[in-house]
Amino acid sequence: MSTGAWLQLAVFLALLLALAWPLARYIDTVMAGRFALGRRLEGPLFQLAGVRPDEETGWLRYALGLLVFNGLGVLAVYALQRW
């Protein structure tokens, strides 16, 4: 490997190690429900989308949502490639 490749690898690993602790704390805060900014943004978006946060999603609804999302993604990529 060239010197540039080794340098790029070293910078990437240094950034990865430097960001690991702050990202872990952020994920812990979000998962524990203590992230206030997320709740303020989440409420209106849930209402707009018709999501009820206290209700679990069944497997059928999850599977249909996954298929619709992936289908729209395929159409978007196709449209971008044709354009």
Image (cartoon, grey):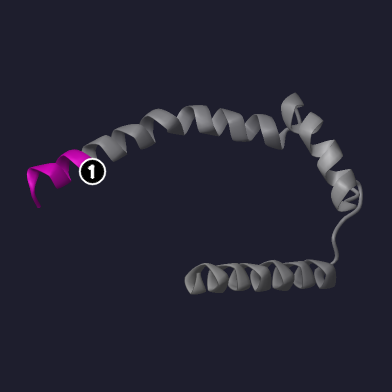
Pointer 1: what residue? 9
Q: Quadrant of residue 4?
A: top left
Q: Is residue 35 visible?
A: no
Task: Examine the structure image and report whether residue 3 is included in the region drawn in magenta.
Answer: yes
Crowding at dot 1, Cα within 10 Å, few <14 / some 14-19 / many 20+, comes out as: few
Q: Which secondary structure type mostly characterizes the magenta part of the structure?
A: helix
- Residue at the location (83% across, 73% down)? 60
> Which residue is rendered at x = 73% and y = 26% of the image?
37
**Observer-nearest residue: 2 or 56?**
2
Q: Quadrant of residue 47?
A: top right
Q: Is residue 61 left or right of residue 72?
A: right
- Return the x and y of residue 32 as percentages of the image width and height: 73, 33
Mark 1 secondary-structure assignment: helix
Residue 51 magenta? no
Considering only vertical position in the picture, is 8 above or below 23?
below
Residue 15: x percent and y percent? 35, 33
Q: How many marks?
A: 1
Residue at coordinates 67% horizontally, 73% vertically from top-left? 71
The x and y percentages for residue 8 are 22, 41
What segment carries the magenta color? 1-8
Vertical order, 51 against 71 (above or below): above
Between residue 48 and residue 6, name the one nearer to us.
Answer: 48
- In this picture, residue 29 sits left or right of residue 82: right
* Amino acid found under the numbered disc labelled 1: Leu
Front residue of 11 and 79: 79
Q: Residue at x 59, y 73 (%)?
A: 74
- Relative to 29, is 21 on the left or the right? left
